[in-house]
Image (cartoon, rainbow, N blue to C red):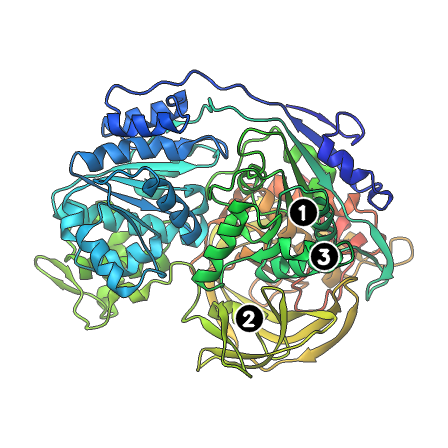
Amino acid sequence: MTSSTSPSRRTGPLLARLLSAPSHSGRVTHVEHVPARQAGRARWPEWAPDVLVSHLENHGITGLWQHQLDAAEHVRRGQNVIIATGTASGKSLAYLLPAVAHVLEGGTVLYLTPTKALAADQLRAIRALRLAQVRAATYDGDTPADERLWVRRHANYVLTNPDMLHRSMLPGQWSSFWRRLRLVIVDECHGYRGVFGSHVAQILRRLRRVCAKYGSSPTFLLASATASDPAVAGSRLTGLEMAEVTVDASPRGSATFALWEPPLTDLRGENGAPIRRTAAAETADLLSDLVVEGVRTLAFVRSRRGAETIALAARRNLEEVSPELPAQVAAYRAGFLAEDRRELEKALRSGELMGLATTNALELGVDVSGLDAVLIAGWPGTRASLWQQAGRAGRAGQDALAVLIARDDPLDTYLVHHPEALFGRPVEAIVLDPDNPYVLAPHLCAAAAEIPLTEPDLETFGPAAADVLDDLVERGMLRKRATGWFWTSRDRACDLADIRGAGGAPIQVVEADTGRLLGTVDEPSAHMSVHPGAVYLHQGETFVVDLLDLDGEVALVTAADPDYSTYARDITDIRVAESLRTRPFGPGELHFGSVEVTQQVVSYIKRRTQTGESLGEEPLDLPPRTLHTRAVWWTLPDSALAPLMTAAEGKPVDLGGAAHAAEHASIGLLPLFATCDRWDIGGVSTPIHQDTGLLTVFVYDGHDGGAGFAERGFARAADWLSATREAIASCECEQGCPSCIQSPKCGNGNEPLDKAGALRLLDILLTS
């Protein structure tokens, strides 16, 4: 890999065309050039089915590259394996060959994916083989009821997701399928992290147990983007020993990867800090420019609203160029109805769409060939996701452009000015905790409902299972008899586990005037995104929320065209339940333990769409939510803080503002050291906390029971907090801005904040 900090040296042709516009001057902070890679030798294994080989060769595939062959051979020998190679390295062929071989020999295959889009894409690929003996079908929330019966009785290659496996297949009548199950494919397994990954780990343990009941012991093949310690991650996810395949022998075109920082504007924020142009506005402009140039482009955006906003702004830009161009841009996100998603996927594959603003719903391996460029609006949370998204361009081997556009956020700013943190570094380890009691308990109930639990089953579910079972018996959720543990309720045990953390039934978003169902929002997100007065975007249409009825599970909206966006604000209180680990840290202490967090959305801010300028704040009356989770926190005694009370440059440090600023920046930087993003975590800071009696800064996991992120922060505290200090110090602002210490989700309106005080506070904490 070669790189340059000057965008003028070896700049790729697409990037050069973008930079030719005078308005783009000074945006690029770094350019990385990834050279092309030649393919290794391809060959077929001796056991490859002739009918499949013949079909593939007719389509120009002359054999497997070495990494595909190695993975397929592991499966053929009955050895569990994880293949962890780059985007577009042909992982699907590595599992397709042994999967089809198993089906032709009378077995069944189960394919698991995090997204419906990827399952639908894989189904198209399998059906294109035209093998009569392979009866492949998707089984997900979009599958009609009459088709579900056919799939259960007749399909021998079932493509589904963890949700359907958990709620429908494992509790259902699938004995014939389980009895013949030979291979379980877990695709894009790097997406199974945090609490969601912990749930999936227990679902896979339940699957292994059900298969054992029916006499089968399927091999597991996991496919992932390049991952840190893939065999360890795969073993933690499945509970099985894993071989790993990591050397990529596939061809790849060269790529140009640019880091892009939007400029400061002439506008000033509430505290007088300059406002940087938003990543959304910058991405919309770049997407427009690329579509005008005839460059097929995906723009990855962090949020559903962001995807809609960027698509809408790009279409408005294109209206000024040609009346035909706006129709070539659209938004794609979760929450769309199934038929809308399928239509967009078809239009993107056909070339009818030249630009698509999408959430990470299209990050995973949906086959979209012929893309030229990828725009990434804001750090996606992990290096694995960054390379996964960037790899969507150039999938047919052609040269490609990827651009990471920084949001006004401490981590984004840090990364575009520290490219060494991105390039030439291994991707993150997959963080998950299958022993989380909030995860384990409902799955033990579900397992007992499927087959009564026995003592030998405890080994399958891990070392925490025995204590959790005792608690479930005490709470009356399971009954213990001489032969094991039984589920005795008439309710469905699988309904106890909320595997994606949605927190309840989804909220239906309905247009009040017409009754049209626009989409859905998960219940916790509803407090933030469809509260009364919120601006809601759907496929380029803008609505304002009139009513949020949490009991009725509906939000009523009316079409509107406001020139602002809305941002919810909340207040947070935190109590220490138990400190599980403690160690000295500088003159203070570092803790990891259990906490109780109470949050309530209390208001929302209106911000002008193009500039981010605040237009005022409106109060809200929504119920509080309580979270039992894990946190990392640090304390400093009064003796260590004494120097801060001495005036520096004529002004003593505001301890509350200093701690608050350090908290915000540390939340922004933790995703660099744990596999999360800032929306997975939260924080609280105070000069004197009621439980510690000291200045305390908390950073907590935003999921019941914890997700492993705070624990990773405890383990990497020195590196994490040192990077936090550097991010604050290197920011060009004077008083503090969104690039260093301001937070987009601060419940206190980013007041008080003391940038200079935060630096002095962290200097004291980091004293060895």
Three-letter amino acid code at disc 3?
Ala
- The reply to whether callout 1 and callout 2 are in contact (CB within 8 Å) is no
Q: Neighbour class for label 3 at 10 Å: few (<14), some, many (≥20)? A: many
Residue at 68% across / 55% down in the picture? 324
Residue at 57% across / 60% down in the picture? 304
Q: Neighbour class for label 2 at 10 Å: few (<14), some, many (≥20)? A: some
Query: Which circle marks residue 599 in the picture?
Result: 2
**Sequence-first tag of 2 and 3:** 2
Q: Neighbour class for label 1 at 10 Å: few (<14), some, many (≥20)? A: many
Residue at 45% across / 78% down in the picture? 553
Report, in whole angstroms, how far the alpha carbon at label 1 lies from the one at label 3.
14 Å
Q: Which numbered mark, 1 or 2, is in the foreground of this view?
A: 1
Let me know if residue 377 appears in the view: yes
> Picture coordinates of residue 650 (x, y %)?
91, 57
Residue at 12% across / 47% down in the picture? 214
Q: Which residue is mark 3?
A: 661
Report, in whole angstroms, how far the alpha carbon at label 2 lies from the one at label 3.
20 Å
* Left or right, 244 with reference to 478: right
Report, in whole angstroms, how far the alpha carbon at label 1 lies from the one at label 2.
24 Å
Let me know if residue 630 appears in the view: no
Three-letter amino acid code at disc 1?
Leu
Three-letter amino acid code at disc 2?
Gln
**Image quadrant where one finds the C terminus:** top right
Q: In the rendered view, would you say 433 is above or below 441?
A: above
Q: Quadrant of residue 253?
A: top right
Query: Which circle marks residue 411 in the picture?
Result: 1
At mark 3, the secondary structure is helix
**Sequence-first tag of 1 and 3:** 1
**Image quadrant where one finds the N terminus:** top right
